[in-house]
Amino acid sequence: MSNRQRIVIFGATSAIASACARQWVRRGDSLFLVGRNENKLESLMANLRVQSSTGQQIEGAIADLNDFEQHEELFARAEHALGEIDVVLIAHGTLPDQQACENSVPLTMAEMRTNGLSVIALLTGAANRMEARGRGCLAVITSVAGDRGRASNYVYGAAKGMVILFLQGLRNRLAKRGVTVITIKPGFVDTPMTARFEKKGPLWAEPETVAYGIVTAVEKRRDIVYLSGMWRWIMLIIRHIPESIFKRLSL
Ligand SMILES: NC(=O)c1ccc[n+]([C@@H]2O[C@H](COP(=O)([O-])OP(=O)(O)OC[C@H]3O[C@@H](n4cnc5c(N)ncnc54)[C@H](OP(=O)(O)O)[C@@H]3O)[C@@H](O)[C@H]2O)c1
């Protein structure tokens, strides 16, 4: 069997996902890219096609992933373009304005939909397809923010945490069916999402580095990966601070 993979990326124009796409194209894989912004998607696909060789498919579709009605059609189009789907990477997301969410139920619900519910909707469709075939790999970019709720970003954290728990159950279901489920937990990454932060220090990573971690996790069929690895230990400590102390901290 060829080790060339047929990969679908949701949220393909994200800085981290497009870095993954470039690395996968270099290793000879075929891609179906779903992005919301037409110009960004077209330009990403044009760049990837330049790097690709004969036999590699680089196709795509425009979609707002909050429109769940479109998901089935996206899978059908991806299967039509690639033949079969070996790997699904779900990468789209937004970083909510926490304070604005505290004052707006609709905004909070919209953020939960983008960062939580739309991911769960996509996973439900993808999981059933892969389970029926008895193979495949589902990889999802969550966040270290999903490991513990903090005052400064608990709307985002709760949505990511919901996905983390969903993935845990899905992994438990699909492990017996030949399907791998990977939970990817990046720390701070220098991308447009974090444009408003000052990006200095050893906790910050480049999208290419995080993408390399994702590509490797998919190749090695890992379960849970922190990127970079030191976040595993940081979050271990953070998770173990007693709630009676944690609630008094400003984090
Ligand atoms: N950067 C970090 O520090 C960090 C840390 C931990 C986890 N993450 C996670 O990493 C993933 C990738 O983020 P990034 O840092 O690469 O940020 P990014 O470059 O800002 O990418 C976010 C992407 O999500 C897309 N998106 C948002 N809502 C969408 C929707 N309803 N339908 C379709 N696409 C939608 C955006 O599309 P448009 O271009 O159309 O806006 C954009 O391409 C996200 O899940 C994020 O939560 C990031």
Image (tube, rainbow, N blue to C red):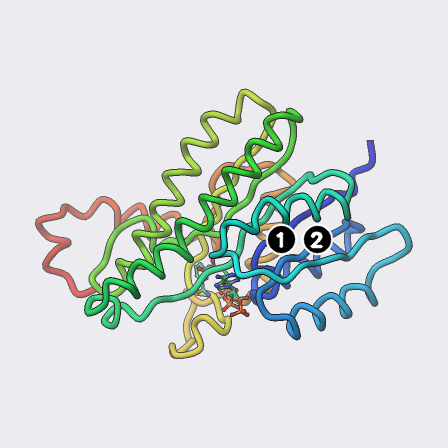
Query: If you read the primary sequence from the N terminus, does the residue marked by circle 1 or circle 2 appear first?
Result: 1
Asked whether 210 or 146 is in front, the reply is 146
Q: Position of residue 167 (x, y in %)?
A: 44, 38
In front here: 121 or 89?
121
Q: Quadrant of the C terminus?
A: bottom left
Q: Tell me whether the residue at label 1 lies in contact with that at label 2, contact meaning CB atoms closer than 8 angstroms.
A: yes
Disc 1 under 8 Å from ligand 1? The reply is: no
Q: Amino acid at mark 1?
A: Ile
Query: What residue appears at the point 58 percent right and 49 percent down from the top-left corner?
Result: 89
| Residue 243 position in % (x across, y down) | 13, 47
> Would you call the spot at circle 2 few (<14 residues within 10 Å), some (14-19), or many (20 or more)?
many
- How far is mark 1 from mark 2, CA to CA? 6 Å
Q: Which residue is mark 1?
A: 9
Residue at 47% x, 25% y is 173
Disc on res. 32 = 2
Residue extending furthest toward the top: 176
Relative image position of residue 189 (x, y in whole percent): 47, 66
Residue occupying the point 59% across, 57% down? 211
Q: Is residue 36 above or below residue 70?
A: below
Q: Quadrant of residue 168?
A: top left
Quadrant occupied by the N terminus: top right
Residue type pointed to by label 2 = Phe
- Depth check: 238 or 141 in front? 141
